[in-house]
Each structure stands twice: as structure tokens, then as C-alpha cells.
Amino acid sequence: QEAMAFGDQWYDLEMLKSVKYGYLMGNATEDLKKEFSSDRITLSNDEDGIYEILKKKMAKIGWEIKSLEEHTDFFSCLYMKKYEYKNG
């Protein structure tokens, strides 16, 4: 499916494996990390791992995010950018 998910616990495993973009947080246990390739493990929660993945994905399509502080509502901004991109 065209979905993205993030998790750090064993109960997240099925969800992360069932989506196209499933990422394990860096603070997960070492045993759980063995279930994922290194490109599917991001930084920990405390190191803004979700932000880092989103920033990389957005850069691939030409959108730049310099910092989370730039936007008061980050996800609303993403939605609007996607809308503008699709609708010219």
C-alpha cells in the first residue's frame, strides 16, 4: 500500500511490514532491528527520526524542509504542498 508508518515496538512489526514505507525508530530493541534493513531504520524519537525520513522523501521530489520550526503545522503544510503539486 502507498502508506508510511513508524514504530519502535514488536507490536508495530506487522504494521511496518504491511506498508510500502515502514520505518523502525532507532530506539527500538536490537532484536527488533534485526527484522529490518538498515535503510528502514531511522534515528530515535529523541533525534527526530520521523522528521529525517520525511525530509529525505520530500527532497527526492524537490521539496525542501529546512526545519520543523519553519511551519506551525507541519502536516498541514505537507498536505497543501501535495495539493499544489497535483493540481498545478
Image: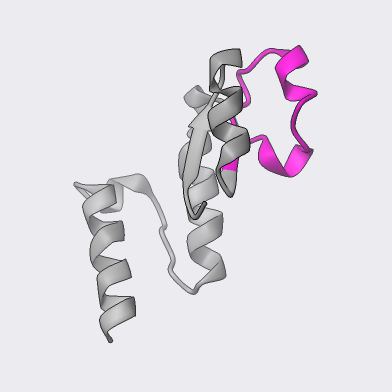
Question: Is 33 placed above or below 64 here?
Answer: above
Q: Residue at x 25, y 58 (%)?
A: 77
38 in magenta: yes
> What sort of colour scheme is used for the picture?
one colour
Q: Residue at x 49, y 25 (%)?
A: 45
Q: Give the range drawn in magenta.
A: 22-42
Quadrant showing the C terminus: bottom left
Residue 82 position in % (x across, y down): 32, 68
Question: Is 46 placed above or below 3 here?
Answer: above
Residue 2 position in % (x across, y down): 49, 55
Q: Classify residue 11 by image quadrant.
A: top right
Q: Which residue is drawn at 28% across and 49% down?
A: 74
Question: Is 43 placed above or below 72 here?
Answer: above
Residue 38 position in % (x across, y down): 77, 38
Q: Is residue 72 visible?
A: yes
Residue 61 position in % (x across, y down): 51, 72
Q: Can residue 23 be seen in this view?
A: no
Q: Residue at x 63, y 17 (%)?
A: 28
**Closer to the camera, 60 or 4?**
4
**Closer to the camera, 87 or 1?**
1
79 in magenta: no
Could you tell whether 7 is left or right of 85 in the image? right
Question: Is 81 placed above or below 7 here?
Answer: below
